[in-house]
């Protein structure tokens, strides 16, 4: 076993994780990979992995020796590390619940949309950390902030985060109006 496979093949060598503008390792601690498709959102948009997003993830994980073993699972060649694409279960489902029915092992990664990724930040980090992580993601991959706002629950953590949505909207508006996002096309139109 090589040095790379002793550690996670997705975190051992940061240079290998240059997935390009549409996909990134969004959180090493939570083991989240984020793939985005478009720059503009409507709050009524479905928040799910499109076929183009799925194919993009599969294509970019292949050089890291991940092979698709089922529709939603990619397995690393030399370890039991999997990348899981949680299934979309129902219209109107909360992006906070996307991982609910997709259990994972300790070393597994989830492949999510930016909105689903931001929801995991809200649920697993303090307010300040969640906002900072959302900001860092927004400048690379826009988030459907209105969708998050619509699904925030009456939990203290969620209510605190709702106060940051206005600030995040401003950050996102500036990011989408500037390079490199400004001229980026929808992933589905280039795959």
Image (cartoon, rainbow, N blue to C red):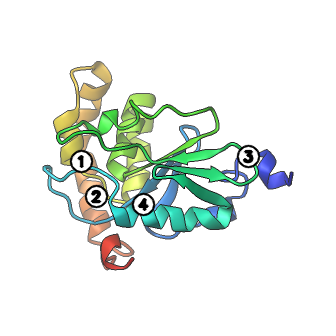
- Of the numbered discs in the image, which one, if any, rests on residue 145? 1
Q: Tell us which disc is closer to us: 4 or 1.
A: 4
Residue neighbourhood size for the residue with mark 2, other residues' Cα within 10 Å, grouped as few (<14), some (14–19), many (≥20):
many
Residue neighbourhood size for the residue with mark 4, other residues' Cα within 10 Å, grouped as few (<14), some (14–19), many (≥20):
some
Residue neighbourhood size for the residue with mark 1, other residues' Cα within 10 Å, grouped as few (<14), some (14–19), many (≥20):
many
Mark 4 highlights which residue? 54
Circles 3 and 2, Cβ within 8 Å, touching? The answer is no
Circles 2 and 1, Cβ within 8 Å, touching? The answer is yes
Q: Looking at the picture, does residue 121 appear above or below residue 67?
A: above
Q: Looking at the picture, does residue 32 appear above or below residue 21?
A: above
Query: Picture coordinates of residue 178 (x, y %)?
Result: 32, 73
Residue found at x 73% / y 52%: 12
Mark 2 highlights which residue? 172
**Callout 3: SS:** loop
**Callout 2: SS:** helix
Q: Is residue 33 left or right of residue 164?
A: right
Res 19 quadrant in image: bottom right
**Callout 4: SS:** helix
Q: Tell us which disc is closer to us: 4 or 2.
A: 4
Q: Tell us which disc is closer to us: 2 or 1.
A: 1
- CA gap, disc 4 and disc 1: 22 Å
Mark positioned earlier in the residue sequence (4 or 2): 4
- CA gap, disc 3 and disc 4: 22 Å
Mark positioned earlier in the residue sequence (4 or 1): 4
Residue found at x 67% / y 59%: 14
Mark 3 highlights which residue? 79
């Amino acid at each position: 076993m090589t040095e790379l496979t002793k550690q996670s093949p997705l975190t051992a060598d940061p240079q290998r994780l240059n997935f390009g503008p549409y996909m990134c390792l969004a959180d090493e601690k939570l083991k989240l990979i984020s793939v985005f498709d478009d720059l503009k959102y409507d709050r009524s948009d479905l928040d799910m992995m499109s076929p183009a997003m799925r194919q993009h993830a599969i294509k970019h994980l292949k050089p890291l020796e991940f092979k698709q073993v089922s529709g939603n699972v990619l397995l690393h060649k030399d370890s039991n590390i999997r990348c899981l694409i949680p299934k979309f279960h129902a219209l109107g489902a909360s992006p906070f619940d996307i991982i609910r029915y997709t259990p994972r092992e300790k070393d597994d990664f989830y492949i999510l949309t930016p909105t689903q990724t931001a929801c995991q930040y809200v649920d697993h980090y303090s307010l300040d950390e969640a906002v900072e992580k959302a900001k860092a993601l927004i400048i690379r991959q826009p988030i459907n902030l209105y969708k998050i706002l619509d699904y925030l629950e009456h939990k203290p953590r969620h209510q605190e985060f709702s106060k940051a949505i206005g600030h995040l909207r401003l950050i996102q508006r500036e990011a989408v109006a500037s390079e490199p996002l400004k001229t980026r096309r929808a992933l589905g139109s280039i795959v």
